[in-house]
Image (tube, helix red, strand yellow):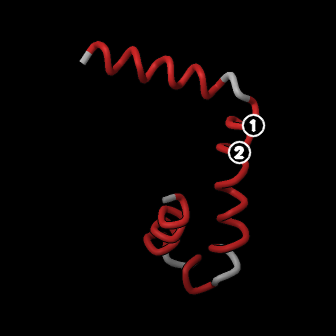
Amino acid sequence: MQLALVHARFQFLETVRVPIAVISNTVFPPLILLFFVVPNADDAGNPVVATSAVAQLAV
């Protein structure tokens, strides 16, 4: 378990050191929400459906 935690820590540090990874992880999810979920009034009115729509786009 200790080795897995050390590996996860170093993977996180490696990701944070790459600027495009940080930018894409912070910018793309809100853009996807704005372009695909918010314009669809049926999905945007129901929080469960909106959350599942964003989760499906993330996978």
The x, y position of residue 37, in whole percent, is: 63, 73
Count of numbered marks: 2
Residue 58 x %, y %: 53, 58
Mark 2: few, some, or many residues within 10 Å (few <14, many ≥20)? few
Helix, strand or loop status at disc 1: helix
Q: Residues within 10 Å of mark 1 (few under 14, many from 20)?
A: few
Q: Position of residue 9 (x, y in %)?
A: 46, 19
Q: Which residue is outermost to the bottom?
A: 42
Say left or right for 42 vs 1: right
Quick check: 36 above or below 27? Answer: below
Residue under numbered circle 2: 24
- State yes or no: discs 1 and 2 in contact (Cβ < 8 Å): yes
Q: Quadrant of residue 40?
A: bottom right
Tell me the quadrant of the picture where the N terminus can be found.
top left
Q: Is residue 6 above or below residue 29?
A: above
The reply, left or right, for residue 56 in relation to residue 29 is: left
Tag 2's secondary structure? helix
Q: Amino acid at mark 2?
A: Ser
**Percent position of residue 51, x then y:** 49, 65
Task: Give the residue at x 55% y 80%.
Answer: 43
Q: CA distance from mark 1 to mark 2?
A: 6 Å
Q: Which residue is mark 1?
A: 20
Q: Amino acid at mark 1?
A: Ile
Rendering quarter of residue 4: top left
Image quadrant of residue 38?
Answer: bottom right
Give the vertical position of 20 relative to 59 (above or below).
above
Which residue appears at 67% of the width and 64% of the height? 32
Q: Mark on residue 46? A: none
Which residue occupies 31% across, 14% down? Answer: 3
